[in-house]
Amino acid sequence: MTLPTSTAELRALDAAHHLHPFSDTKSLNAEGSSVIVKAEGVWLTDSDGNRILDGMSGLWCVNVGYGREEIVEAVAAQMRELPYYNTFFKTTHKPAIELAAKLAELTPKQFNRVFFTGSGSESNDTVIKLVRRYFQIKGKPEKKIIISRHNAYHGSTVAAGSLGGMAPMHGQSAVIPDIVHIAQPYFWGEARQGETPDEFGLRTARALEATIDALGEDRIAAFIAEPVQGAGGVIIPPATYWPEIARICRERDILFISDEVICGFGRTGSWFGCETFHTEPDILVMAKGITSGYMPLGGVMVADRVVEVLLEGGDFNHGYTYSGHPAACAAALANLDIMQRENLVGRVANDASPYLKALWSTLADHPLVGEAPMLGLLGALELTPDKIGRTKFPDPGKVGMLARDFSFKNGLVMRAVRDRLIIAPPLVICHGEMDQLVASVRKTLDDTHAELKRMGWVH
Ligand SMILES: *Cc1c(COP(=O)(O)O)cnc(C)c1O
């Protein structure tokens, strides 16, 4: 068969045979998907030749931007040499060896060992088995509850989806036992009237301590959290939150898991989000930016004090065919090389983030915008009919989707989470592109405002 070339025919074929993730496929098929055909730097091109600025780095992963020949070359060379071999049965290979050593160098000092996976979800499934195994070996098998947070995202397999706090996901699939969710540090959405961000941050953090006490420390294995919740809507915690969580984790006999699938590899202006917030995780979860999305790869870094115990436990009965896939490891190595050579982490901290944040925060003056926070290259805009009362629009998600669709038409990929718009552009985005991004967002806000007036939702 030869693939048709017109957008209409491509859409029809897609609709006939493709079930899309996290989509209402019936309404998507009626509307038609955008067909993305190529990309360069921060720009996507669709099948009609439109250029669109990728404000989401694909799915939070294309940190070094599109079109990096070095990564393509490294993968091709590795595939010629050794396209695949496993790491299960007393074998290993050079790309896995080199990447493991590289990750030990780049991650905080407590980390010297990695378990490779193929994705963030597989990494978190690995984490669940690993922390429970750790306490089994220590003779405390009843310590198996993992505390997570509402509106957290930790992946989409049955176990990772259970670990996450996405109610719409839990509603459609069985959840695994021994996972408990506590409040998230979402000031705009969940603070009490009159509460300051600092007070709210402390109160929310202390829910961890209260939950440990209520369930019994002898039953809790770990606490897992994203430094900044990504899929939940770029929830940047108040300044008091992480220091208080760090104190609680230090005082209690539980493991702290930092899910760095989005925050890792420069996104927050440090190599890892835990460095930005000065926490000390025992386990660090990676995927997405590790290869900038050029190949699928994930990994779990395990701190030395945890490894010491695991090494006493004999076989760890867990692994994936593609754990440490050679071509994926080669992509990661070339990607990390680019990040270091171009000092992308320093660039985010000292140049890109301050520049974009200054522009982004001006959007807070728009009548629809309740808050416009940004950390590193993670930004959000809370849309509201009433900034002072922090009220929500009726039919949550409708206004967000309206704005997101305007944004696509205005040449910018933004994502809507409920009525919160979010961005996470590639770390290489230049000043001129950031100017365009923010101008495009302002136009989208104006278009959305005009439409809401027409609908009678605002005055
Ligand atoms: C995307 C994501 C995952 C899941 O990664 P997949 O590669 O999609 O399985 C896990 N945790 C966080 C924080 C994520 O953003």
Image (tube, grey):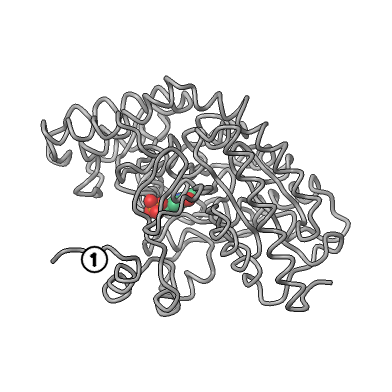
The type of residue carrying mark 1 is Pro
Eyeballing the image, is 31 above or below 70? below
In which quarter of the view is residue 70 placed? top left
Helix or strand or loop: what does disc 1 sit on?
loop
The residue most toward the top is 341
Residue 404: x, y in percent?
Answer: 58, 62
Question: What residue is rendered at 28% in x and 40% in y?
Answer: 313
Disc 1: which residue: 4
Pick the residue in front: 151 or 48: 48
Pick the residue in front: 185 or 415: 415
Residue 431: x, y in percent?
Answer: 60, 32
Residue 174: x, y in percent?
Answer: 41, 73
Task: Mark yes or no: residue 23 visible.
Answer: yes
Q: Is mark 1 within 8 Å of ligand 1?
A: no
Residue 321: x, y in percent?
Answer: 19, 49
Pick the residue in front: 328 or 17: 17
Question: What residue is rendered at 36% in x and 43% in y?
Answer: 293
Question: What residue is rendered at 77% in x and 56% in y?
Answer: 370
Specify few, some or many for label 1: CA neighbours under 10 Å numbering under 14, 14-19, or 20 or more.
Answer: few
If the image is split into quadrants, where does the N terminus sit?
bottom left
Specify whether 276 is left or right of 153.
right
Pick the residue in front: 268 or 351: 351
Task: Mark yes or no: residue 128 visible.
Answer: no
